[in-house]
Image (tube, helix red, strand yellow):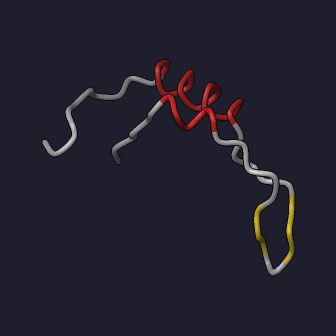
Amino acid sequence: MRSVHSETTKTRRTRAALDGGQLVIPWECPERVDTLLAGLRRAPLPAGRPGR
């Protein structure tokens, strides 16, 4: 699996998400980007360039 990240992701703050036909508080938020990136940095994953 490839992970792709852009700092512009952190500027997006969604107010609601549609789940099961209802508007709910979204899981995705700028703070979650930091949490995911920290976990990826700790994991022993091979680095690569997109398309290779």
Q: Is residue 25 left or right of residue 43?
A: right
In this picture, residue 8 sits left or right of residue 44: right
Which quadrant would residue 5 be assigned to in this image?
top left
Res 11 → quadrant: top right
46 displayed left or right of 25: left
Could you tell me residue 24's position as x and y percent? Answer: 86, 62
Instruction: Say which residue appears at 46% left-offset and 24% top-offset.
Output: 43
Whether residue 41 is situated above or below residue 16 in the rendered picture:
above
Residue 28, percent from left and from top: 69, 46
Relative to 50, does residue 26 appear above or below in the rendering? below
Quarter in which the C terminus is drawn? top left
Choose between 28 and 2: the one closer to the eye: 28
For this view, does 10 lie left or right of residue 44? right
> Residue 35, how many percent across, how many down?
64, 27
Residue at image point 48% right, 27% down:
40
Residue 39 in the image: state x and y as whole percent.
55, 26
Q: How many marks?
A: 0
